[in-house]
Amino acid sequence: MKSILVKDLLSITKGQLIVGKQDTICENFSKDTRKISKGDVYIGIKGEKFDGSCFWEEALKKGASVVIVENISFTQDNKELWKDRTIIKVKNTLQALYEIASYKRSLYNIPVIAITGSVGKTSTKDIIASVVSQKYKTLKTEANFNNNIGLPFTILKLKDHQALVLEMGMNHLGEIHLLTSIAKPNICVITNIGTSHIGNLGSRENILKAKLEILDGCKNPTIIINNDNDLLHSWYENEKYNKNIKTFGINEISDYNSNNIKMETKSSKFTCKINNEKVEINVPVGGEHFILNSLCAIAVGNELGIENEKIKKGIGQFELTKKRMDIIELKNGIKIINDSYNASFESMKASIKYLSTFVKNRKIAVLGDMLELGEFAKELHENVGKEIYNNKIDILICSGDSARYIAKQAENEGMSKDSIYFLKDKKQILQKINKLMNPNDVILFKASNGMKFFDIVDELKNKN
C-alpha cells in the first residue's frame, strides 16, 4: 500500500495546518459523518444543500483522525480540545479532493480502465471488473459513484490493488474531462452514444464530443468502442489510422465479434475468436446488450493478457449491480425485471426487447418518465410507445408527465386501449399491479431514477 501522510496533504492542497502532526498516516477517506470510522480522514465537501465543513467537529467526535475543511474559523479552545487530532484548512475542499485523488493515482503503476457511454456503463463495468479480477486484485466503482465526487473517493480506496476499473458519467460538456484528468486511464471504453442527457447537450453529436473527453487525460491509451453504434463507427472510420482503437460488435465486422448466438430469457451463449481461438462464452444474464457488454470485457481482458479461459470464467460469474436488470422471483411464478435505476430511449428499447423474449408469459411493462431530454422528450417517449407495440407487450402501465406520450403512441400504433393504463403515481401503480397480477406474469419496471419505481418493486417483494 502506498501511504499518504498529513505532510503530503499539506503539500498537495497547499493547505494550512491548524493543529496536528505531519507524520500521521492518511489511509481511509470519507465525506459522510454518518459513516465515519476511527482513524478516517474526513473531507468536508460543500454541496447544494449543506456545507460538509460545518460537521468537522462531529467527524472528530466519531473518531476521525484528520479533517479537511474550508471557511471555518477555529478558536484557541478548539485547537486545545483537538490537539491530538489533525485539522487542515484549504481554500476549496472539492478542489482538494481532486488534488488528493490525482496524487493517489500517481502512486500506482497499474492498469486503469475507464468506462463511459450513454447506457450500459455500470453493467459493462461489472463484467469488465469480473474479467480483470481473474488476473489482478481489482478495485471498481461501487454502485454508480461515477461523478466528480464518487470517482475521486473510489481512487482514494486504492490499497494493495493491481488494477482499477472506473465508471465515468456526465450531464454536461467538460465533466468527463475533469474525471479523466484525475484518473489518467490507460484503457478507455465507450459503450455507445445515445440520447441520455440530450436535453442538456442538444444533440447526439455533442454527446459524442462529451464522451470523447475520456481521452483527454491519457497518453496513447487503448480505446475500445462499440462498432455497432452509428456515431462511434463513423468516428472510428476517421480515426483508426491515428489511434490505438479496438472494436467490438454483433453486426459490424470488428476486432471482437459474436457468432452462433443462442438467446434465452436468463442467459445467452455465443462464440468469439480470441487470439485465433474460437471460445464459447456463457453470459449469465439475458438480453442482446449483455452480449455487447461481454464482447467489450473480452477486448479489455485480451488487451491485459488475460488467458481465454479466465476471460470466459470472469464473464460467466459476474454479478450485476442491483436495480439493473435484476430479476426477482415472487410467488406463483411471477417474475419482476427491476431495471428501475435509470432510463434513456436506448435502455428502454433494450429492456422492452428483453421483456419480449418471455414468449410463454404474459408481459407487463411499467414505464415512467425518461428525464433530461428537453425538447426531445415527446419524440423519444413516443418512440418507446412504438417499441411497446412492436414487441407485442401485453399490458402497458405508465406514469409521469412525459410517459403519457408512451401510452398514447402505443394506442396509436394499434395496442388495445383496454391494455393501457395511465396512472397518477406510485400508489396507484402498486394498486393496479396487485389487481392485475396473474401467476407466471413477467413485469418490467423501467424509468429514470427520479421516478423512484424501485419503491414499488420493494413493496411487491415485501408483500409477495
Image (spheres, grey):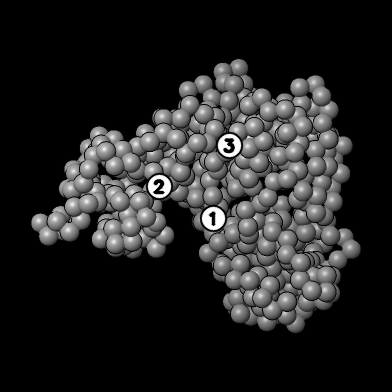
Can you say whether 276 is above or below 156 in the image? above
Instruction: Report helix, strand or loop for mark 3.
Output: loop
Query: Looking at the picture, which amino acid does disc 1 mark?
Result: Leu
Residue that numbered label 2 is attached to:
28
* Residue 382 versus residue 116 in the image, above or below: below
Residue 360 vs residue 187: left or right?
A: right
Distance from disc 3 to disc 2, alpha carbons, whole Å, reads 18 Å
The quarter of the displayed image where residue 357 is located: bottom right
Q: Position of residue 193 (x, y in %)?
A: 60, 41
Q: Which residue is mark 1?
A: 373
Q: Nearer the viewer, residue 127 or 351?
A: 127
Q: Secondary structure at mark 1?
A: loop
- Which tag, 2 or 1, sits closer to the chain's start? 2
Q: Residue at x 81, y 58 (%)?
A: 356
Residue 415 visible at all: no
Which residue is painted at 52% across and 29% down in the image?
Answer: 110
At a point 55% along the width and 61% down the height, the residue shown is: 449
- Label 2 is placed on what type of residue? Asn
* Distance (Cα) linking label 3 and label 1: 39 Å
Q: Quadrant of the N terminus?
A: top left
**Disc number at residue 137?**
3
Instruction: Of the two numbered discs 3 and 1 on the same chain, state the one appearing first in sequence.
Output: 3
Give the foreground label among 2 and 1: 2
- Closer mark to the observer between disc 3 and disc 1: 3
Q: Residue at 82% of width from left, 31% of height from top?
A: 279
* Sooner in the amino-acid sequence: mark 3 or mark 2: 2
Name the residue furthest top.
Answer: 241
- In the rendered image of this protein, does residue 15 appear above or below residue 239? below
Q: Are marks 3 and 1 in contact (CB under 8 Å)?
A: no
